[in-house]
């Protein structure tokens, strides 16, 4: 593959529009742009998790694969009619969820984002993923969006929650529990 970007600035967006993958131009706040922009934010937040030292190899492997899939998902959203995320991707997230959740104790209390730098970053990625899912649903109300990307983001936010629990235990021995009665 040759160079894809020889010049980073193009000035084509100075009028408040951006180009989609099919060559059409839309406003920068178009629901489609919002959707794939939030997917990009989620991918970046996962990058923060992976940048933390001492991430267990199974977590690193799963999240690195997720980053590639999120890039594919962004492409699917950027090119109307393009398909990249399939049922097998959703099933793989479910399998990973089951594997990571297997060793965790059942939740009896709400937990707060925290437990260590990587766990806190994973909670941020989870919240960002939820926003991406909401923006994709906003897009789905006005344009066609396949079911699998929506399911993928829903499962991914659950997976990120479970991985945050795993990382909190790995980093500090446990989660930060919400104290209902603080007075």
Image (spheres, rainbow, N blue to C red):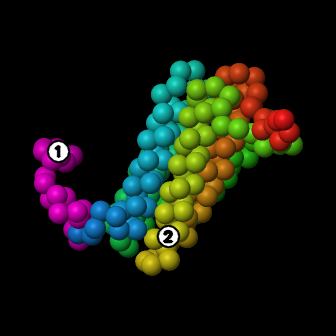
Q: Residues within 10 Å of mark 1 (few under 14, many from 20)?
A: few
Task: Classify residue 15 as left or right of residue 96.
Answer: left
Magenta stretch: dominant secondary structure: loop
Q: Are marks 2 and 1 in contact (CB under 8 Å)?
A: no
Query: Residue 117's image quarter?
Result: top right
Quarter that holds the C terminus: top right
Q: Earlier in the sequence, mark 2 or mark 1?
A: 1
Direction from residue 167 to residue 18 in the image, left or right = left
Q: Position of residue 44 (x, y in %)?
A: 44, 41
In percent of the image, x 52 and y 25: which residue is there?
52
Quadrant assignment, res 171: top right
Task: Give the magenta part as a residue range.
Answer: 1-24
Q: Residue 34: image x %, image y %?
A: 40, 61
Q: Nearer the viewer, residue 84 or 51?
A: 51
> Residue at (19%, 48%) from the top-left corner?
4
Residue 36 visible? The answer is yes
Q: How many marks?
A: 2
Q: Is 9 inside the magenta-drawn segment?
A: yes
> With respect to residue 118, does 106 lie above or below?
below
**Up/down of 122 relative to 153, above or below:** above
Disc 1 marks which residue? Answer: 8
Alpha-carbon neighbours of circle 2 within 10 Å: few (<14), some, or many (≥20)?
some
7 magenta-colored? yes
Residue depicted at 41% across the width and 50% down the height: 40
Q: Mark 2 to mark 1: distance in Å? A: 30 Å
Depth-wise, is mark 2 or mark 1 nearer the camera?
2
Q: Which residue is mark 2?
A: 138
Residue 1 picture location, percent across and down? 21, 46
**Relative image position of residue 118 (x, y in whole percent):** 58, 29
Q: What secondary structure is marked by label 2?
A: helix
């Amino acid at each position: 593959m040759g160079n894809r970007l020889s010049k980073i600035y193009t000035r084509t967006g100075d009028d408040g529009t951006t180009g989609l993958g099919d060559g059409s131009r839309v406003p920068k706040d178009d629901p489609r742009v919002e959707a794939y922009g939030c997917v990009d934010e989620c991918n970046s937040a996962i990058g923060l998790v992976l940048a933390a030292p001492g991430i267990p190899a199974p977590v690193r492997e799963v999240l690195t694969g997720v980053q590639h899939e999120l890039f594919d998902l962004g492409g699917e959203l950027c090119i109307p009619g393009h398909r990249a995320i399939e049922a097998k991707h959703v099933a793989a997230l479910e399998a990973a969820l089951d594997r990571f959740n297997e060793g965790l104790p059942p939740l009896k209390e709400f937990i707060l984002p925290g437990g260590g730098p990587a766990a806190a970053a994973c909670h941020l990625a989870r919240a960002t993923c939820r926003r991406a899912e909401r923006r994709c649903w906003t897009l789905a109300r006005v344009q066609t969006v396949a079911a699998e990307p929506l399911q993928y983001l829903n499962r991914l936010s659950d997976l990120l929650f479970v991985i945050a629990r795993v990382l909190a235990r790995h980093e500090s021995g446990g989660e930060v529990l919400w104290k209902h009665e603080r007075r």
